[in-house]
Image (spheres, rainbow, N blue to C red):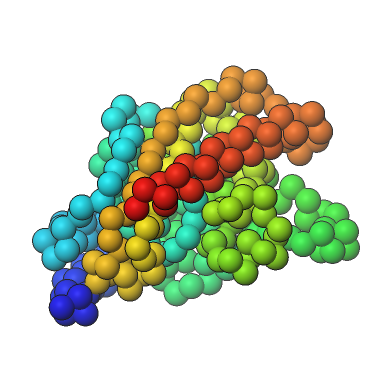
Amino acid sequence: MTVIKGVIYLLLTLPVTILTLVLALLLALLKLVIPIDVSQRFLTVVLLAVAETWAITCRFFYRCVHGINWDVQGVAGLSRRQWYLLVCNHQSWSDIPILLFLLGGRIPVFRFFVKRQMLWVPIVGLACWAMEFPFMRRYSREQLEAKPELRGKDQQATQLFCERMKKHPATIVNYLEGTRFTQAKHDRQASPYRHLLKPKSGGVAYVVTHLGERVSTLVDVTIIYPVAKGFWAFLSGQLGAVKVRIKLRKIPETFKSGDYQNSESFRQQFQQWVGEIWQQKDELIAAELKRR
């Protein structure tokens, strides 16, 4: 029965997804060939509206086919008129639709930090570019030592992205772990957390610094999968009693005017703040898993 439901959900959402991708492609091509600032801003707004409509439609079909009986706490107090910085633990491709389903319509449209490799994915990469998602490129220590001029490239991209985000309320999403959690990655990192990988603080610090006068709230989301977490489990409604815990955190004012790249003391303070959040998140996951 779960397989049948999964197929039904795919058949319902596939035409909507294809139509959305076609519209996104056309709008992105228009944005690419019309370099007028007013037109670009208008096309970006339309693209975001198309993406949000797709998410709302998929959520409606999901409710019809599977229902949403997830255990959610902390959605009160959110607004579409504010800027937010959202961080979340990352375990599965299911994380993204869960965030969209639960917070879509409650806060401004998401802008994700995405790996630069996504730029070359047909249609999707162009759509992400057109919606002004920040593309981040990770350099190894060896690459930076061989080419010092690469230092600060991601910071420049983040700064440009933040300047664009000042015009309208936005939700900037950053998965601090940088990749999905697996036990192998956890062991390779020698992560000090039981259920999380080590967080990367640089991208968040740059956003806080450059959007300091806009962003005052960190939306700290923790997703716990007591039963299953695979993407097929999401599509077929086998996730079980997913737990989502949302905590709104005030961003310290002292972090809005620091220099993460060049100030060692600022960097240590910021990393300590993120580390404390991650420690609390790890303890929360452990406690919730015990209650299942």
Horizontal and vertical percent position of residue 58:
22, 61
Horizontal and vertical percent position of residue 227:
35, 63
Q: Is residue 74 left or right of residue 121?
A: left
Q: Is residue 156 above or below residue 265?
A: below
Q: Is residue 38 above or below residue 125?
A: above
Q: Quadrant of residue 53?
A: bottom left
Q: How many numbered marks, from 0 up? A: 0
Q: Quadrant of residue 204?
A: top right
As drawn, the residue found furthest toward the right would be 146
**Depth check, front residue: 247 or 9:** 247
* Residue that appears at 79% across and 29% down: 265
As drawn, the residue found furthest toward the left would be 64
Horizontal and vertical percent position of residue 19:
24, 69
Residue 39 shows in this picture = no
* Residue that appears at 46% across and 38% down: 220
**Depth check, front residue: 54 or 184:** 184
* Residue that appears at 40% across and 46% down: 288
Q: Is residue 197 left or right of residue 98?
A: right
